[in-house]
Image (cartoon, rainbow, N blue to C red):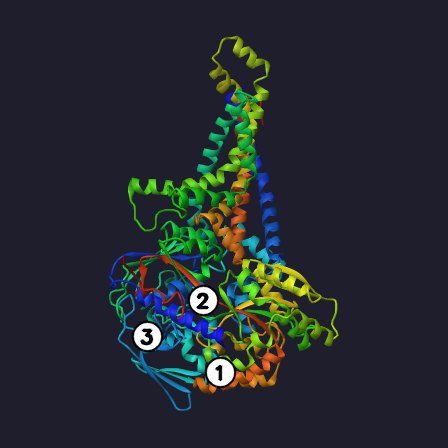
Amino acid sequence: MSRLLVVLACLAAFVAAPALAQGTPTPGGTAIVVLGSDPEHLNAGISTGYPIGAVGASLYSALVYQDADGVVHGELAEGWTVSDDNLVYTFTLRDATFHDGAPVTAADVVHTMESILGPNHGRFQRAFNEMASIEAPDARTVVITLNRPYAPLLGLLTVFDAPILPKHLYEGTDPLANPVNDAPVGSGPFRFVEWVRGERVVLERFDDYFLENALLDRLIYRVVPQDVARSTAIEVGEADLVWGFYMPTSDLARLEANPDVAVWKGLTIPSLYFMFVNNEHPQLGDARVRQAIMHAIDREQIVEQAQGGLGEVAGGPFGAGFRYAYSEATDYRSLYPHDPERARELLAEAGVSDLTLRFVYDSARGAFAAAAEIMRDNLRQVGITLDVQPVERSVMVERVYGRDYDLTLQSFTSSGDPAIGYHRIYLTAAPGTNFVNATGYSNADVDRILTEAAGLADQDARAALYAEAMAILAEDLPTLPIFDELSTQASTANLNGLLQRLDQRDGLEFAWFGN
Amino acid sequence: MSGARGSKALGAYALERLLNAVPLVLGVIVVNFLLVSLAPGDPVTALIGEYPAPPDYVERVRAQYGLDAALPERLLRYLGSVVRGDLGFSFANRQPVATLVIERLGRTLLLMLTTVVFATAVGIVLGVWAARRPHSAVDRGATGFALAGYSIPEFWLGQILILIFAVGLGWLPAGGFRSIRADYAGWAAVVDQARHMVLPMLALSFRYMAITTRLTRASLLEVMNADYILASRARGLSERRVLWEHGLRAAALPIITVIGYNFGFIVAGSALVETVFGWPGVGRLMYDSIFTRDYPVLLGILLLVSVSVILVNLLTDVAYALFDPRVRY
């Protein structure tokens, strides 16, 4: 538990740090934000791509946003009520306008959800499938009725999963081919100015923003495809902000030593790195073998050497990001310390010897290659040979979710709620759907408990359920959680007011240049 | 040689070569298409993104992009549209491939042509310099440079140039096509763009410069030992005229050949250099399209490159005739 507390304390300190930034917020200036690849288009309502979401976060607004602690607040929604049976959510809208001057009404929200997000946005689909109806009884009221209680709903109504688009520009068109996708109109703090494909997207402050106006005059998203060139761009002042998603961790020390650059480390969106184990493999189907592998892997060493220290050894199946989804009683670090001797005993008990396992990972992930080497060495010590197979990403996806692998390293995030990103890893599923249960693990109790937890809004009640699920998972060990990733960010030292929200990409309207 | 007859013959030869190129281009399209389609990995996975899409949604996307048809059918459909001048529609960018490529072609041509001109000029000067004093310190220096230049990978060189000239010395921008913070106009914009072009051009030039240097040196050394050079000298021509007018002209054929030969390598190099320097050109579009499995874009660019290489080789052959009166077609 103490380690978790340290992480949480660090988190609190890091989150508090930007608030202590010197001086008074002053408007003006242009901030250049690095994107690692060109957005394919700028309609955040039809794509879950990272660069599109990055630009979209400043361009669009949504019913709600999540603060740095993951607490949900109203954005376009002035407030909302939830019926006693947790089935009916009624939102009241603020007076807001789109960048073309048209008002944002309940009809825009309904049209966006039903016709644009529902059929086309990967993560929103999850919430959409739980909805019985979305209605607009009047211009300021949106009523969402669910089929059954679904706790993560609010977390899926943020600008990343449910940006609100103007009905008058999309109605009657194919949202995938609408030219507005390349010259977007939202109601966020910044409006679209220009997009030069491959080079930059330019936004400027929207002066009729319905909340407090942004401080920066302009935001320019600049595409820097090569990771090393991104840290260079910050060093030489050709960019002002790089998010951890695009940061080459090997350059962090150099950037930290530079007085003109501010480096931040901490937890934003929880991100957990797992070793998935194919439970359908004849030997790996035995929980003792999976436990042995967990004992054999030196997770501390992986964090230190492969991850450059940017991580914390994982304590449980849902990571450290959600306090209510962790139970100290079955902390994986106490249950499965690095212990090759114990690993050999467990393997002997299971009658396994001379095991060769195919270890598949995405070859583009440098840290994975380093971790693979450490694991190969760790497992060799207990008599398991790793056949390391780095493959191109789409091949990796096909193989892992088609269950044509023995072990694989994967990272998952679960923005806002463990039910969004982590439940799918443990819930029973047939092979063939990407990014769900890849291990073949199936436990009726786990299915029941997690499904119940996803329907409860009360976090204390959920905590009891997660403790129960974690106890089962700690024993079965369908996946081997390795570490919680710490996120990073590098920015020009005089760019203040960053990191106001759970997602690094959100909240740039609060950024300002000081001394 | 009669000039009129020669150029007519040359014209006919060029036309014949162009016609011969048609089956070659068709072959290239088919081979590219098969290579790309048979590569492991599903473009639909890349298209859909990182979330558990229900199988029926996956199938809908597959059908939407025409990826549900059998390979021969897709190939025929693709050939048909290319023949009609339609390069297809980008999966990822939701734009016609031609629009995407044309938008970036100018920037890549700018970089490539500057590279070819710069590298050829510098390579010839270095080569001549080395050939005039064989086995001198200058010669050894130029030969050493040529060997190094040929061995250094472009993307690595690009990063080193950035570290030295952008990060260390702060003389030149580290990347991009132009300054993003300042909006320059007129002459200032030209200077700004030229400054952004120096490092990528150097990175791309090195290998090519090295080949030209080595070739010029070798070719010139051979020519300068010929009898007619001795005769020119005997007639009392200045060494400068002997070298540049008589020697180099005769030594030019292999150099011209190498321009054509290297064109394909420069295109390939530009994909890496454009990525290192964030240069928004066709090379980077190709690099991105490989990672997003954007097959129509990838195929379109491969086709463009193949056609350019064929054209450049044709131009090289035509240039032979212009440089060397002995060459007839």
**Residue at the bottom extreme of this rendering:** A84
Residue B135 lies left or right of residue A263; in this view the side is right
Q: Are marks 2 and 1 on the same chain?
A: yes
CA gap, disc 3 to disc 2?
A: 21 Å
Residue A168 x, y percent position in the rendering: 33, 70
Residue A75, numbered circle: 3
Classed neighbour count for the residue bearing mark 3: other residues with Cα under 10 Å, few (<14), some (14–19), many (≥20): many
Chain of residue at mark 1: A
**Amino acid at dot 1:** Ala
Image quadrant occupied by the C terminus of chain A:
bottom left
Residue A38 seen in render: yes
Chain of residue at mark 2: A
Q: Could you say whether the residue bearing mark 3 is in a helix, strand or loop?
A: loop
Q: Quadrant of residue A16?
A: bottom left
Which of the two labelled residues, at mark 1 and mark 3, occupies the earlier sequence position?
Answer: 3
Residue A313 x, y percent position in the rendering: 53, 69
Dot 1 corresponds to which residue? A454
**Amino acid at dot 3:** Glu
Residue A498 x, y percent position in the rendering: 34, 64
A405, A479: nearer the viewer: A479
A513, A84: nearer the viewer: A513
Residue A209 lies left or right of residue B46; in this view the side is left
Q: For the residues labelled 2 and 1, say whether their Cβ atoms are less than 8 Å apart.
A: no
